[in-house]
Protein backbone atom coordinates (compact mmCIF):
# COMPACT_ATOMS: atom_id res chain seq x y z
CA UNK A 1 0.00 0.00 0.00
CA UNK A 2 1.04 3.57 -0.61
CA UNK A 3 0.58 5.79 2.45
CA UNK A 4 -0.07 9.06 0.63
CA UNK A 5 -2.05 11.86 2.20
CA UNK A 6 -4.20 12.07 -0.96
CA UNK A 7 -1.83 14.23 -3.02
CA UNK A 8 -4.60 15.18 -5.46
CA UNK A 9 -6.42 17.00 -2.65
CA UNK A 10 -3.35 18.39 -0.87
CA UNK A 11 -1.99 20.03 -4.03
CA UNK A 12 -5.15 21.04 -5.86
CA UNK A 13 -5.03 24.66 -4.63
CA UNK A 14 -1.39 25.32 -4.09
CA UNK A 15 2.03 23.75 -4.50
CA UNK A 16 4.31 23.63 -1.48
CA UNK A 17 7.12 21.35 -0.45
CA UNK A 18 5.67 18.07 0.81
CA UNK A 19 6.78 14.59 1.91
CA UNK A 20 4.85 11.35 1.37
CA UNK A 21 5.85 8.13 3.17
CA UNK A 22 5.51 4.98 1.11
CA UNK A 23 4.92 2.63 4.07
CA UNK A 24 1.86 3.06 6.28
CA UNK A 25 3.30 1.40 9.41
CA UNK A 26 5.14 4.14 11.38
CA UNK A 27 7.16 1.50 13.28
CA UNK A 28 8.51 -0.05 10.10
CA UNK A 29 12.22 0.27 9.36
CA UNK A 30 11.28 0.91 5.74
CA UNK A 31 11.58 4.71 5.62
CA UNK A 32 11.26 5.23 1.89
CA UNK A 33 9.52 8.47 1.11
CA UNK A 34 8.84 10.86 -1.75
CA UNK A 35 9.55 14.57 -1.49
CA UNK A 36 8.07 17.20 -3.76
CA UNK A 37 10.13 20.37 -4.10
CA UNK A 38 8.52 23.05 -6.28
CA UNK A 39 10.56 25.71 -8.05
CA UNK A 40 9.53 28.55 -10.30
CA UNK A 41 9.16 26.49 -13.49
CA UNK A 42 8.67 22.91 -12.36
CA UNK A 43 8.72 20.54 -9.39
CA UNK A 44 11.34 17.97 -8.46
CA UNK A 45 9.90 14.67 -7.25
CA UNK A 46 12.58 12.88 -5.23
CA UNK A 47 12.46 9.31 -3.99
CA UNK A 48 14.49 9.08 -0.76
CA UNK A 49 15.84 5.53 -0.30
CA UNK A 50 18.82 6.43 1.91
CA UNK A 51 17.83 4.69 5.17
CA UNK A 52 16.25 1.83 3.22
CA UNK A 53 19.54 1.16 1.41
CA UNK A 54 21.44 1.20 4.73
CA UNK A 55 18.99 -1.26 6.29
CA UNK A 56 19.13 -3.56 3.26
CA UNK A 57 22.93 -3.47 3.23
CA UNK A 58 23.07 -4.39 6.94
CA UNK A 59 20.98 -7.49 6.15
CA UNK A 60 23.24 -8.38 3.24
CA UNK A 61 20.53 -7.60 0.68
CA UNK A 62 20.98 -5.77 -2.58
CA UNK A 63 19.31 -2.35 -2.82
CA UNK A 64 20.46 -1.35 -6.28
CA UNK A 65 17.85 -0.29 -8.80
CA UNK A 66 17.12 -2.68 -11.69
CA UNK A 67 18.11 -1.57 -15.18
CA UNK A 68 14.44 -1.70 -16.27
CA UNK A 69 13.57 0.67 -13.43
CA UNK A 70 16.25 3.18 -14.42
CA UNK A 71 15.27 2.94 -18.08
CA UNK A 72 11.63 3.71 -17.27
CA UNK A 73 12.59 6.63 -15.04
CA UNK A 74 14.96 7.93 -17.70
CA UNK A 75 12.25 7.86 -20.38
CA UNK A 76 9.80 9.70 -18.13
CA UNK A 77 12.41 12.26 -17.09
CA UNK A 78 13.49 12.96 -20.67
CA UNK A 79 9.91 13.44 -21.78
CA UNK A 80 9.11 15.70 -18.79
CA UNK A 81 12.28 17.76 -19.33
CA UNK A 82 11.34 18.26 -22.98
CA UNK A 83 7.90 19.46 -21.92
CA UNK A 84 9.39 21.90 -19.41
CA UNK A 85 11.78 23.37 -21.99
CA UNK A 86 8.98 23.35 -24.58
CA UNK A 87 7.03 25.63 -22.22
CA UNK A 88 9.94 28.09 -22.15
CA UNK A 89 12.26 27.07 -19.30
CA UNK A 90 15.73 28.31 -20.36
CA UNK A 91 17.96 26.71 -17.71
CA UNK A 92 19.52 23.33 -17.01
CA UNK A 93 17.84 20.43 -15.20
CA UNK A 94 19.99 18.38 -12.82
CA UNK A 95 18.66 15.01 -11.69
CA UNK A 96 20.14 12.20 -9.60
CA UNK A 97 19.70 8.51 -10.45
CA UNK A 98 21.59 6.78 -7.66
CA UNK A 99 20.27 3.94 -5.50
CA UNK A 100 19.82 6.27 -2.51
CA UNK A 101 18.08 9.22 -4.19
CA UNK A 102 16.11 9.16 -7.40
CA UNK A 103 15.01 12.51 -8.86
CA UNK A 104 12.36 13.20 -11.47
CA UNK A 105 11.30 16.55 -12.89
CA UNK A 106 7.61 17.26 -13.42
CA UNK A 107 5.32 19.99 -14.58
CA UNK A 108 2.99 20.96 -11.75
CA UNK A 109 -0.06 19.39 -13.39
CA UNK A 110 1.80 16.05 -13.65
CA UNK A 111 3.13 15.86 -10.08
CA UNK A 112 0.36 13.51 -8.89
CA UNK A 113 0.85 11.15 -11.84
CA UNK A 114 4.62 11.19 -11.31
CA UNK A 115 4.24 10.29 -7.62
CA UNK A 116 1.89 7.39 -8.42
CA UNK A 117 4.08 6.06 -11.22
CA UNK A 118 7.23 6.28 -9.10
CA UNK A 119 5.50 4.63 -6.13
CA UNK A 120 4.24 1.75 -8.28
CA UNK A 121 7.72 1.20 -9.67
CA UNK A 122 9.32 1.28 -6.21
CA UNK A 123 6.84 -0.86 -4.27
CA UNK A 124 5.35 -3.16 -6.91
CA UNK A 125 8.09 -3.36 -9.56
CA UNK A 126 5.47 -2.06 -11.99
CA UNK A 127 7.10 0.22 -14.54
CA UNK A 128 4.13 0.47 -16.86
CA UNK A 129 2.88 3.72 -15.35
CA UNK A 130 6.30 5.34 -15.87
CA UNK A 131 6.29 4.25 -19.51
CA UNK A 132 2.70 5.45 -19.89
CA UNK A 133 3.69 8.81 -18.41
CA UNK A 134 6.62 9.06 -20.83
CA UNK A 135 4.36 8.20 -23.78
CA UNK A 136 1.78 10.79 -22.74
CA UNK A 137 4.37 13.55 -22.32
CA UNK A 138 6.37 12.72 -25.46
CA UNK A 139 6.48 15.51 -28.02
CA UNK A 140 6.37 14.88 -31.80
CA UNK A 141 9.95 16.06 -32.27
CA UNK A 142 10.64 13.61 -35.10
CA UNK A 143 7.70 15.04 -37.00
CA UNK A 144 8.70 18.63 -36.37
CA UNK A 145 12.21 17.88 -37.62
CA UNK A 146 11.18 15.80 -40.63
CA UNK A 147 12.78 16.93 -43.91
CA UNK A 148 11.04 19.50 -46.04
CA UNK A 149 9.83 23.10 -45.90
CA UNK A 150 6.65 23.59 -43.87
CA UNK A 151 4.80 25.95 -41.58
CA UNK A 152 3.91 24.85 -38.04
CA UNK A 153 0.83 26.67 -36.76
CA UNK A 154 0.41 27.74 -33.14
CA UNK A 155 -2.62 26.08 -31.59
CA UNK A 156 -2.55 23.34 -34.20
CA UNK A 157 1.02 21.98 -34.24
CA UNK A 158 2.34 23.56 -31.02
CA UNK A 159 1.15 25.66 -28.06
CA UNK A 160 3.92 27.99 -26.73
CA UNK A 161 4.67 31.41 -28.24
CA UNK A 162 6.42 31.00 -31.61
CA UNK A 163 9.71 32.47 -30.38
CA UNK A 164 9.79 30.09 -27.40
CA UNK A 165 8.92 27.12 -29.59
CA UNK A 166 11.58 28.02 -32.15
CA UNK A 167 14.25 28.22 -29.44
CA UNK A 168 13.24 24.78 -28.15
CA UNK A 169 13.23 23.34 -31.66
CA UNK A 170 16.70 24.73 -32.40
CA UNK A 171 18.07 22.93 -29.35
CA UNK A 172 16.53 19.62 -30.43
CA UNK A 173 17.75 20.09 -34.00
CA UNK A 174 21.32 20.61 -32.76
CA UNK A 175 21.21 17.21 -31.03
CA UNK A 176 20.21 15.64 -34.34
CA UNK A 177 23.08 17.47 -36.07
CA UNK A 178 20.59 19.49 -38.11
CA UNK A 179 20.45 23.04 -39.35
CA UNK A 180 16.88 24.15 -38.70
CA UNK A 181 16.53 27.13 -41.11
CA UNK A 182 13.70 28.33 -38.88
CA UNK A 183 11.81 31.61 -38.64
CA UNK A 184 9.08 32.63 -36.20
CA UNK A 185 6.11 34.71 -37.31
CA UNK A 186 3.18 36.16 -35.35
CA UNK A 187 1.35 32.84 -35.15
CA UNK A 188 3.55 30.18 -36.70
CA UNK A 189 7.06 28.87 -37.18
CA UNK A 190 8.59 28.04 -40.57
CA UNK A 191 11.19 25.26 -40.61
CA UNK A 192 13.30 23.49 -43.21
CA UNK A 193 15.61 21.01 -41.41
CA UNK A 194 18.74 20.06 -43.33
CA UNK A 195 21.59 17.77 -42.32
CA UNK A 196 25.04 19.30 -42.10
CA UNK A 197 27.65 17.41 -44.13
CA UNK A 198 30.06 17.30 -41.18
CA UNK A 199 27.40 15.89 -38.86
CA UNK A 200 26.45 13.27 -41.43
CA UNK A 201 30.07 12.18 -41.73
CA UNK A 202 30.55 12.04 -37.96
CA UNK A 203 27.46 9.88 -37.45
CA UNK A 204 28.46 7.54 -40.25
CA UNK A 205 32.03 7.21 -38.92
CA UNK A 206 30.99 6.40 -35.33
CA UNK A 207 27.49 4.85 -35.52
CA UNK A 208 27.85 3.33 -32.04
CA UNK A 209 27.45 6.78 -30.52
CA UNK A 210 24.21 7.43 -32.43
CA UNK A 211 22.14 4.23 -32.21
CA UNK A 212 19.02 4.22 -34.35
CA UNK A 213 20.04 7.28 -36.34
CA UNK A 214 19.17 7.36 -40.01
CA UNK A 215 19.67 10.03 -42.64
CA UNK A 216 16.24 11.25 -43.78
CA UNK A 217 17.41 14.63 -45.00
CA UNK A 218 20.33 14.37 -47.48
CA UNK A 219 18.44 12.87 -50.45
CA UNK A 220 15.11 14.48 -49.69
CA UNK A 221 13.46 16.21 -52.65
CA UNK A 222 10.67 18.73 -52.15
CA UNK A 223 7.45 17.48 -53.81
CA UNK A 224 5.53 19.57 -56.27
CA UNK A 225 3.16 21.93 -54.55
CA UNK A 226 5.25 22.19 -51.38
CA UNK A 227 4.51 25.33 -49.34
CA UNK A 228 6.60 28.36 -50.23
CA UNK A 229 7.95 30.38 -47.34
CA UNK A 230 7.05 34.06 -47.76
CA UNK A 231 10.07 36.26 -48.37
CA UNK A 232 10.70 38.54 -45.40
CA UNK A 233 13.32 40.84 -46.93
CA UNK A 234 17.03 40.89 -46.26
CA UNK A 235 19.60 38.87 -48.13
CA UNK A 236 18.60 36.30 -50.72
CA UNK A 237 17.60 32.85 -49.55
CA UNK A 238 18.82 29.38 -50.49
CA UNK A 239 22.32 30.54 -51.43
CA UNK A 240 23.65 27.08 -50.57
CA UNK A 241 20.95 25.14 -52.44
CA UNK A 242 22.75 22.62 -54.68
CA UNK A 243 26.21 23.35 -53.25
CA UNK A 244 28.83 20.58 -53.04
CA UNK A 245 29.48 19.54 -49.40
CA UNK A 246 32.89 20.17 -47.89
CA UNK A 247 35.01 17.02 -47.70
CA UNK A 248 36.58 15.85 -44.41
CA UNK A 249 39.48 13.45 -43.98
CA UNK A 250 41.41 11.96 -41.08
CA UNK A 251 44.98 13.21 -40.68
CA UNK A 252 47.33 12.21 -37.89
CA UNK A 253 49.07 15.25 -36.45
CA UNK A 254 51.08 15.87 -33.31
CA UNK A 255 48.88 17.42 -30.67
CA UNK A 256 50.00 19.12 -27.50
CA UNK A 257 48.59 17.74 -24.26
CA UNK A 258 49.17 21.05 -22.51
CA UNK A 259 48.42 24.59 -23.64
CA UNK A 260 51.12 27.24 -23.00
CA UNK A 261 48.72 28.87 -20.53
CA UNK A 262 49.03 25.78 -18.34
CA UNK A 263 45.65 24.13 -18.93
CA UNK A 264 44.96 20.95 -20.86
CA UNK A 265 43.01 21.64 -24.08
CA UNK A 266 39.86 19.62 -24.54
CA UNK A 267 38.25 18.15 -27.60
CA UNK A 268 36.11 20.19 -29.96
CA UNK A 269 32.93 18.68 -28.56
CA UNK A 270 33.76 19.41 -24.92
CA UNK A 271 32.73 22.44 -22.94
CA UNK A 272 36.02 24.36 -22.84
CA UNK A 273 34.79 27.60 -21.29
CA UNK A 274 37.19 27.38 -18.34
CA UNK A 275 40.18 27.00 -20.64
CA UNK A 276 39.08 29.84 -22.92
CA UNK A 277 38.55 32.22 -20.00
CA UNK A 278 41.87 31.30 -18.40
CA UNK A 279 43.75 31.52 -21.70
CA UNK A 280 42.32 34.98 -22.41
CA UNK A 281 43.40 36.20 -18.97
CA UNK A 282 46.84 34.63 -19.38
CA UNK A 283 47.34 36.26 -22.79
CA UNK A 284 45.68 39.64 -22.29
CA UNK A 285 45.70 40.09 -18.52
CA UNK A 286 42.94 39.87 -15.95
CA UNK A 287 39.97 42.21 -16.06
CA UNK A 288 39.83 44.72 -13.22
CA UNK A 289 36.80 44.07 -10.97
CA UNK A 290 34.19 46.80 -11.13
CA UNK A 291 33.96 47.07 -7.36
CA UNK A 292 37.60 48.27 -7.07
CA UNK A 293 38.62 51.87 -7.61
CA UNK A 294 42.02 51.87 -9.29
CA UNK A 295 43.56 55.34 -9.00
CA UNK A 296 46.88 54.83 -10.77
CA UNK A 297 48.82 52.33 -12.88
CA UNK A 298 50.41 50.32 -10.05
CA UNK A 299 48.67 48.93 -6.97
CA UNK A 300 50.65 47.56 -4.02
CA UNK A 301 48.68 44.95 -2.07
CA UNK A 302 49.80 43.91 1.41
CA UNK A 303 48.57 41.31 3.87
CA UNK A 304 46.64 44.11 5.61
CA UNK A 305 44.84 45.38 2.48
CA UNK A 306 41.05 44.97 2.08
CA UNK A 307 40.09 41.40 1.30
CA UNK A 308 38.85 42.28 -2.21
CA UNK A 309 42.39 43.39 -3.12
CA UNK A 310 43.99 40.36 -1.49
CA UNK A 311 41.62 38.02 -3.36
CA UNK A 312 42.49 39.81 -6.58
CA UNK A 313 46.20 39.25 -5.90
CA UNK A 314 45.48 35.55 -5.35
CA UNK A 315 43.60 35.37 -8.65
CA UNK A 316 46.51 36.95 -10.52
CA UNK A 317 48.96 34.61 -8.76
CA UNK A 318 47.09 31.63 -10.20
CA UNK A 319 48.19 32.61 -13.71
CA UNK A 320 51.91 31.86 -13.24
CA UNK A 321 51.12 28.98 -10.88
CA UNK A 322 49.14 27.18 -13.57
CA UNK A 323 51.46 28.20 -16.41
CA UNK A 324 54.57 26.83 -14.70
CA UNK A 325 52.89 24.00 -12.78
CA UNK A 326 53.89 25.24 -9.33
CA UNK A 327 52.57 23.32 -6.31
CA UNK A 328 51.96 26.45 -4.26
CA UNK A 329 50.63 29.92 -5.05
CA UNK A 330 52.82 32.95 -4.49
CA UNK A 331 49.92 34.70 -2.72
CA UNK A 332 47.64 33.09 -0.16
CA UNK A 333 46.76 35.89 2.28
CA UNK A 334 42.96 35.98 2.00
CA UNK A 335 41.93 35.50 5.62
CA UNK A 336 41.79 38.16 8.32
CA UNK A 337 44.08 41.19 7.77
CA UNK A 338 47.39 40.60 9.54
CA UNK A 339 50.82 42.15 9.60
CA UNK A 340 53.44 40.00 7.89
CA UNK A 341 56.86 39.91 9.54
CA UNK A 342 58.57 39.73 6.14
CA UNK A 343 56.40 42.51 4.60
CA UNK A 344 54.89 40.16 2.03
CA UNK A 345 53.34 42.24 -0.75
CA UNK A 346 52.14 42.07 -4.35
CA UNK A 347 52.58 44.66 -7.11
CA UNK A 348 49.77 44.70 -9.67
CA UNK A 349 50.32 46.67 -12.89
CA UNK A 350 47.35 47.91 -14.92
CA UNK A 351 47.52 48.49 -18.68
CA UNK A 352 44.50 48.96 -20.95
CA UNK A 353 42.13 48.31 -18.03
CA UNK A 354 43.65 44.88 -17.42
CA UNK A 355 46.18 43.55 -14.92
CA UNK A 356 49.13 42.54 -17.08
CA UNK A 357 52.02 42.54 -14.60
CA UNK A 358 52.53 40.95 -11.18
CA UNK A 359 55.37 40.72 -8.69
CA UNK A 360 55.17 38.95 -5.34
CA UNK A 361 57.93 40.05 -2.96
CA UNK A 362 58.99 40.12 0.67
CA UNK A 363 62.03 41.26 2.67
CA UNK A 364 64.77 38.76 3.57
CA UNK A 365 68.02 39.21 5.57
CA UNK A 366 70.43 36.54 4.23
CA UNK A 367 71.64 36.46 0.60
CA UNK A 368 74.39 35.23 -1.66
CA UNK A 369 75.82 36.82 -4.79
CA UNK A 370 75.67 35.05 -8.14
CA UNK A 371 77.31 36.02 -11.41
CA UNK A 372 74.41 34.52 -13.42
CA UNK A 373 76.56 31.88 -15.10
CA UNK A 374 74.66 28.59 -15.33
CA UNK A 375 77.07 26.36 -13.37
CA UNK A 376 78.74 29.08 -11.36
CA UNK A 377 78.53 28.63 -7.54
CA UNK A 378 76.89 31.14 -5.25
CA UNK A 379 79.02 33.43 -3.11
CA UNK A 380 79.28 33.56 0.67
CA UNK A 381 76.24 34.43 2.77
CA UNK A 382 75.82 38.13 3.48
CA UNK A 383 73.43 39.42 6.14
CA UNK A 384 71.55 42.48 4.88
CA UNK A 385 67.85 43.23 4.58
CA UNK A 386 66.88 43.27 0.91
CA UNK A 387 63.63 43.05 -1.09
CA UNK A 388 63.32 39.57 -2.55
CA UNK A 389 61.36 38.67 -5.68
CA UNK A 390 59.26 35.58 -4.99
CA UNK A 391 57.75 35.50 -8.45
CA UNK A 392 57.32 37.83 -11.42
CA UNK A 393 54.74 37.37 -14.18
CA UNK A 394 53.64 39.33 -17.25
CA UNK A 395 50.64 38.55 -19.47
CA UNK A 396 51.81 36.79 -22.63
CA UNK A 397 50.81 39.55 -25.08
CA UNK A 398 52.76 42.17 -23.09
CA UNK A 399 56.00 40.25 -22.71
CA UNK A 400 59.27 41.65 -24.10
CA UNK A 401 57.99 45.21 -23.69
CA UNK A 402 59.96 46.17 -20.60
CA UNK A 403 57.14 45.57 -18.13
CA UNK A 404 59.10 43.07 -16.06
CA UNK A 405 62.04 45.46 -15.81
CA UNK A 406 59.71 48.31 -14.79
CA UNK A 407 58.21 46.18 -12.03
CA UNK A 408 61.63 45.24 -10.62
CA UNK A 409 62.69 48.89 -10.74
CA UNK A 410 59.52 49.86 -8.86
CA UNK A 411 60.21 47.20 -6.23
CA UNK A 412 63.71 48.60 -5.70
CA UNK A 413 62.45 52.20 -5.54
CA UNK A 414 59.71 51.26 -3.11
CA UNK A 415 62.24 49.62 -0.79
CA UNK A 416 64.79 52.41 -1.27
CA UNK A 417 67.64 50.50 -2.89
CA UNK A 418 69.26 50.04 -6.29
CA UNK A 419 68.02 47.45 -8.77
CA UNK A 420 71.31 45.56 -8.35
CA UNK A 421 70.54 45.16 -4.63
CA UNK A 422 67.25 43.34 -5.23
CA UNK A 423 67.38 39.67 -4.31
CA UNK A 424 65.89 36.88 -6.44
CA UNK A 425 64.41 33.62 -5.16
CA UNK A 426 66.07 30.45 -6.39
CA UNK A 427 65.96 28.65 -8.66
CA UNK A 428 65.84 31.48 -11.19
CA UNK A 429 64.05 30.50 -14.41
CA UNK A 430 65.59 31.06 -17.84
CA UNK A 431 63.30 34.02 -18.48
CA UNK A 432 64.09 35.42 -15.04
CA UNK A 433 67.81 35.07 -15.65
CA UNK A 434 67.56 36.96 -18.95
CA UNK A 435 65.68 39.75 -17.21
CA UNK A 436 68.17 39.82 -14.32
CA UNK A 437 71.11 40.01 -16.73
CA UNK A 438 69.60 43.06 -18.45
CA UNK A 439 68.99 44.80 -15.14
CA UNK A 440 72.19 43.77 -13.36
CA UNK A 441 74.85 42.49 -15.77
CA UNK A 442 77.45 42.19 -12.99
CA UNK A 443 75.36 39.63 -11.14
CA UNK A 444 72.47 39.47 -8.68
CA UNK A 445 71.73 38.54 -5.09
CA UNK A 446 69.86 35.28 -4.55
CA UNK A 447 68.24 33.65 -1.55
Image: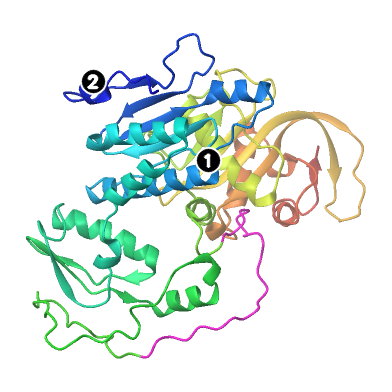
Residue 348's disc number: 1
Residue beneath disc 2: 10
Q: Position of residue 235 (x, y in %)?
A: 17, 80
Disc nearer the start of the sequence (2/1)? 2
Contact between labelled residues 1 and 2, with CB atoms less than 8 Å apart: no
In the drawing, does residue 295 fall left or right of residue 446?
left
Q: Please tell me in which quadrant of the rendered image residue 231 appears.
A: bottom left
Q: Secondary structure at mark 1?
A: strand
Q: Say what secondary structure mark 2 lies in.
A: helix
Asked if residue 399 is positioned above or below residue 325 in the image, the reply reads below
Which labelled disc corresponds to residue 124? none
Image spot of residue 282 (x, y percent) = 54, 53
Front one among 60 and 85: 60
Q: Please report the residue visible at 25 percent of the width from the left and 33 percent of the height from the top.
A: 40
* Residue in the foreground of this view, choosing between 209 and 368: 209
Distance in Å between CA atoms under marks 2 and 1: 60 Å
Q: Which residues are magenta?
A: 244-266
Membership of 247 in magenta stretch: yes
Amino acid sequence: MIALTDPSRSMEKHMTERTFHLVADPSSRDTRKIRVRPSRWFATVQLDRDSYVDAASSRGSEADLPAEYLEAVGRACDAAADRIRYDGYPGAIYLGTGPRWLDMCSQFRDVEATIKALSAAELEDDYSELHALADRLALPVDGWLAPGERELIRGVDFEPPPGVFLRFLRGKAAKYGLRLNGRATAGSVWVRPTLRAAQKQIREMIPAQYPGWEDRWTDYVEPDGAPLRPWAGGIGENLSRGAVPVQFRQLETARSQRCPCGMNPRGAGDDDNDHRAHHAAWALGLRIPRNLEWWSDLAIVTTQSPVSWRKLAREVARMPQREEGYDFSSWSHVGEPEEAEDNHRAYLLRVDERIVGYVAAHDVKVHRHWDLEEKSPYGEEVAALRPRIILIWVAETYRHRGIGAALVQELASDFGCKVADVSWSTPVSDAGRRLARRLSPEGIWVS
